[in-house]
Image (tube, helix red, strand yellow):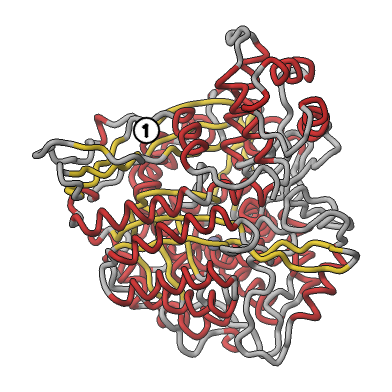
Amino acid sequence: MTAILVACGSPKNSTPKIEDFTFSVDKFADIEILRYRVPGFEDLTLKQKEMIYYLNQAALEGRDILCDQNNRYNLRIRRTLEAIYLNYSGDKKSADFENLTIYLKRVWMGNGIHHHYSEDKFTPEFSENFFKSAILSIDSTKLPLSQGETVESFVNTLIPVIFDPTIFPKRTNQAEGVDLIKTSGNNYYGENISQSEVEAFYAKMKNSNDSTPVSYGLNSKLVKENGILVEKTYKVDGLYGAAISRIVGWLKKAAEVAENDKQKDVINSLIDFYNTGNLKTYDEYSIKWVQDLESQIDFVNGFTETYGDPLGMKGSWESLVNFKNIEATKRTEIISSNAQWFEDNSPIDPKFKKEKVKGVSAKVITAAIIAGDCYPATPIGINLPNSNWIRHEYGSKSVTIENITEAYDQASLGNGFADEFMLSDVERKRAKDFASLTNNLHTDLHECLGHGSGKLLPGVDQDALKAYGSTIEEARADLFGLYYMGDPKIVELGLLPEKEAFKAEYYQFIMNGLMTQLTRIQPGKNIEEAHMRNRQLIASWVFEKGKAQKVIEMVKRDGETFIAINDYEKLRTLFGELLSEIQRIKSTGDFESGKKLVENYAVKVDKTLHAEILNRYKKLNLAPYRGFVNPVYSLVKDAAGKITDVKISYDENYIDQHLRYSKEYSSLPHIN
Ligand code: ZN
């Protein structure tokens, strides 16, 4: 994002029209890369655009942090692959080189050597010998060598990490009955630390009498030094300090052009946190952040989601810069202003309901940049902060990222998927008419109300469900949304045009949970990822409970399986029953029941059905996963160096973007 000089009167940017915009950018392995539009950016004030520019810079500076959190060899491997890609003088048309290029694209997509979704280590399709000779053929000063390290020993270090399938086979291991820390390939814990040591370390740190517990362990790596466990804190003068200092530098610039004092205060608190690493400061920042509802620009920047840690404590670094889509936000404001009605009428035991639902704020946003753990694969909605006590006392902020869902929807139009997997034209027509609407609404309900509803009984540990916690929590939020989508209140509130519309969401949800999400799983594998587990849990539970009454059927036609939903109202009742049970599990911290539900319904895959789905899917030649490239922002300055505009362009391709990011935003040492 270099500043460009334009004499004066440069033509004003405007968002390209949908019909003139190419959403699909690149395709490799199981990935399709899309680009997204940023409608409305040109209507922001110059000061707002400038602020977004600085926040974007702060976002991109954290890229290496996530890469290193994912595995301690990731930065060295990525930098080596990039060095080969740029400097290799051999045949760039050879199969080995082309396969290395694909591998590099996958490493960018996964922010490391593991698949971003399945979390399995990639299998390289180029040979060890090629890799070795390619490294030896380039100037060694281009390689990420440590002080005094020889190229030979460097190669010998990397080769097993890349090629040996038994080393770091999984980034985050959620399997049962093994040491989750020792079997996870990520870098949140040092070497030779066991799960029981970690659990003991944090159990001792947690003070159950503390009514405002900080998120222990969120911003540190736990390592063993001379036999003693110590936290290495992520902060300006600590671990990842080089990148964090640069983030802070850009945040300071952003604070200077903040929209208002409240927002300035939010940014300054985050800077304090990055300076000190103090988790109390982080909570102060989160409280200020969740209370800033007036500003149009907003951002996430920090150690946020804990899905990457098998024990759910360590935060992966991510950033999202965005501004409010004022028109679309009206929809979520209707939901929020009726939050108490939804809570009061939910089908759960009254003793688990919140007497007063606080601060459920919701908005539809336009993403300006996605980074860290939000890039290239990105969520379509977020609900933060994660700290339970802050959510309880101050509420949470919930967003739907509509320009991202626009890109997904536009890229999917007419790709053959609905023709292959939906039962009939009835389902297809309903999807065409309503699915975009109901998808957005389900996300809104999930994020605005689902996660925020219900309460823990006094004394219940928020981590009581341990490794099953994420799946249960996602299921709870999804079920809350599903249950209400079919409620007449939704039509009454004007959120759906007619009662029939909810069926589009129910059909897609069940089809996805029982069948089509299996396209994302390799043959022979189980389901590991929390959101996928949640979807199968819900779909297979209601399928089984409604079996006697044939609520849902698996219909066979010419040897192919289709989902038929015969009774949508009964299905809604079943969603309500499961919501009630899952809320009970969450509220009482019933680990055994949570475990049973997940292990029985969410994990195992029907091998025959799986093979059939993969086969049918393969014929469509679609990529099961999608990632994004960001637009490029540049400052426009006049002859005196004064900023006159921020230009946005959409023409950078996937490879160029990553190579540029690695050049411009890569401040961390090879080994951290
Ligand atoms: Zn969620």
Q: Amino acid at mark 1?
A: Phe
Residue plotted at (46% across, 30% down)? 654
Q: Quadrant of ligand 1?
A: bottom right
Which is nearer the eye, 32 or 650?
650
- Residue 316 coordinates in the image, percent (x, y): 61, 57
Q: Quadrant of residue 488?
A: bottom left
- The answer to whether residue 445 is left or right of residue 145 is left
Position of 494 with respect to 528 (left or right) is left
**Measured along the vertical axis of the image, is residue 641 above or below residue 465?**
above
Q: Quadrant of the N terminus?
A: top left
Q: Position of residue 571 (x, y in %)?
A: 55, 60
Q: Secondary structure at mark 1?
A: loop
Quadrant in which residue 511 is drawn: top right
Q: Is residue 444 left or right of residue 234?
A: left
Q: Nearer the viewer, residue 393 or 615?
A: 393
Q: Quadrant of residue 240?
A: bottom right
Specify whether 660 is left or right of 4. Answer: right
Residue 204 lies, with reference to residue 662, above or below; the image says below
Q: Position of residue 179 (x, y in %)?
A: 87, 57
For the image, the number of numbered tags is: 1
Mark 1 surroundings: few (<14), some (14-19) or many (≥20) residues within 10 A: many
The answer to whether residue 230 is seen in the rendering is yes
Residue lying at the far front of the rendered structure:
148
Residue tagged by mark 1?
A: 23
Q: Residue at x 27, y 58 (%)?
A: 325
Give the residue furthest to the left. 9
Percent coordinates x, y for residue 189 in the rendering: 77, 58
Which sits in the foreground, 569 or 138? 138
